[in-house]
Image (spheres, rainbow, N blue to C red):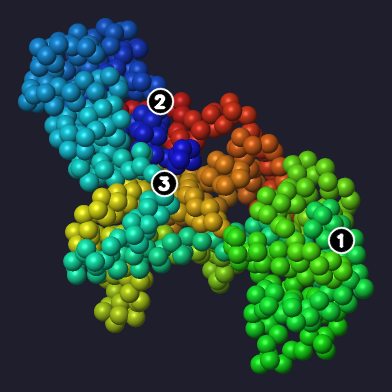
Amino acid sequence: MDQLGFQTASSVARTQGKNALTLQKGQVFEGKIIKFFPNNTAALRLGSMNVTARLEAPLSAGEEYFFQVQQNDGIPRLQVLQADQAALKSGSADQAETAKVLQALGVMNNKNNQAMLGMFQSEQLPFSKDMVQKGATILQQANAMNGAGARLLATMNQAGLPMTLQTFQSLFQVEHGASLSTQLQNLEAQLQSGNAKTMSQAETSAVANLNRKLSQTMAMTNIESFSKTDTGNKLVQLMQMSQSAHAPQAVKEGAMTLLQKTGLVSENFGSAPWLSSFKEALMQPENRAILQNLLPQTFSAQNGVSVADMEPLELFRTVMNRLTLAEGEAGRQQLQQLLTLFQNADGQSKQVDLSSSALRQAMQMIQSNEGANVTTAQERQALTVLYQGTFTNESANAGGMSTIATQLSKLMQQIGMQHEASIAQQSTTSNQQTSLLSESAQEPLKQTLMQYMNQLPTSVQDTAETLLHRITGQQLLAQEQQGPLQQTAIQVPLALGNYHTDLTVQWEGRSQEDGSLHPDHCRIIFYLEMENLGETVADVQIQNRLVTVNIFNEKEKPDMMMELLQPFLKEKLAEQNYSLSSINWKNTEDETKHHKSVYESYSGFEGVDVRI
């Protein structure tokens, strides 16, 4: 999956190269002299940035040199690397010329170091003696002696990350590996397909423990509200609205006509004679099995409910309000049985032949982008209620966190995104308090992976290790960057019904005294790949609590849905003391590419000279 919305390792390198460059003592880079100032100070051009530094030797304006940082306090001092400049600038230098460069750095002249030097030069990356020496060993062990590997090393050095093979592999998985949701599914499939008869006792125990923890994690990725928004449940919700005791009359009428337009119900649906016939159909012995499948225990003897004693409208509302379709094929079959009862109420005995494609066509008929089939105000009101029910996300606790936000927070803990921080916190917690925590709360998936890694069957170890690297890599890249702007990124796997994807959220804003982002002025960017809409980026910009939303997607703008939901969004924002300025849908390819480049390099201050 294209990591359009995630600040990957290479995007971090591009960001730092453009906006937040920090040169370290001993580092080497190529720069061009632009202008001289008094006291041996000069303006240099380094890539796309203007920098100011004090030079140790008289040089010529307009020329390019390789500089080495001698001191980085205040205005750092730079020294021209004592080597043949032609050799340094040559991307195709022969071994003799490369040897002069390595000698100037104080690095051993061997094939690996020669290859590393060539890659740093071709990629125009600042490098150091340590990066050449350790980098060559790391890239060789990781089988990544190429430009992409060199860029990852530069990212590690620039971010101050340990120059180790494990750090490199972790960042590599985020940059080039499969999505987190895919890796979780792959490991789950491998664990469940293993042959216990061929495993040792230790392997069997390790597989069982990891599989149990992985199953817990996968269960937490399911966003409940999305599991109830498939086509079948939307149709059921329209049926419920059409006869609701609480819905306004206009909404009830709109839901009724929308259902009739699908062709799945007759014109008599919901009338008094039809409701009486529906009750008679439910009481027929041949339909009892259908009712028990749709609503097990609803009319069982122990709850004292008698179908015969209920009024037809009351009975219909009871059936519809207690009905929740299962997911996937099972839900489609339940809906088919329900529509069969509806046909019996119309005096028809033929069973409904309802395919998945027919279900989609039924909803597409009333959910077309232009809303051509939604012709009345009542129908638009009914659809508004339907959409708003889809996006309900109420507060789940006294702290004001919504249901989904609370779920995502727990999921991050379950995966192990705060694993190391939790260990540090537990070390300051009394043994009595720690004992009150459940085992699952104390042990996230990351810890379980590390604990049982060496005991797993060889066929599973590679997949488990890849997942572990992926989690660690995301932890490294999610670390907040200090300075005038604070940046934080998270990525979590989600299951939207039967569709698995990753959600990425990035925050940027100024820090408050308590370390949190200032809520009046910040930027939040969401990236999500969805089953129908595909890759979607929502760029939310907040200035003085005024919210502007830019949505980037290659599909055609869903005018009707946006029109119906915008008042709902404005209302929910107002409850949090925010005002909605505008929502803009941008779907041209050029705008998407432009946004991608902006998004990957949004940190820091562009166009600002930096002293090095």
Tell me whether circle 2 and circle 3 mark residues in contact (CB < 8 Å): no
- Across and down, in percent, residue 533 comes to 61, 43
Q: Residues within 10 Å of mark 2 (few under 14, many from 20)?
A: few
Apparent side of residue 410 relative to residue 98 in the rendered image (left or right): right
Q: Residue at x 41, y 50 (%)?
A: 182
- Residue 609: image tag: 2
Apparent side of residue 333 relative to residue 148 in the rendered image (left or right): right
Looking at the rendering, in which quadrant would you find the N terminus? Answer: top left
- Across and down, in percent, residue 110 comes to 8, 24
Mark 1: secondary structure: loop
Name the residue carrying label 3. Answer: 179
Name the residue carrying label 1. Answer: 266
* In the rendered image, the vertical position of residue 561 relative to residue 575, given as above or below: above
Apparent side of residue 528 relative to residue 169 in the rendered image (left or right): right
* In the rendered image, the vertical position of residue 307 relative to residue 448, given as above or below: below
Mark 3: secondary structure: loop
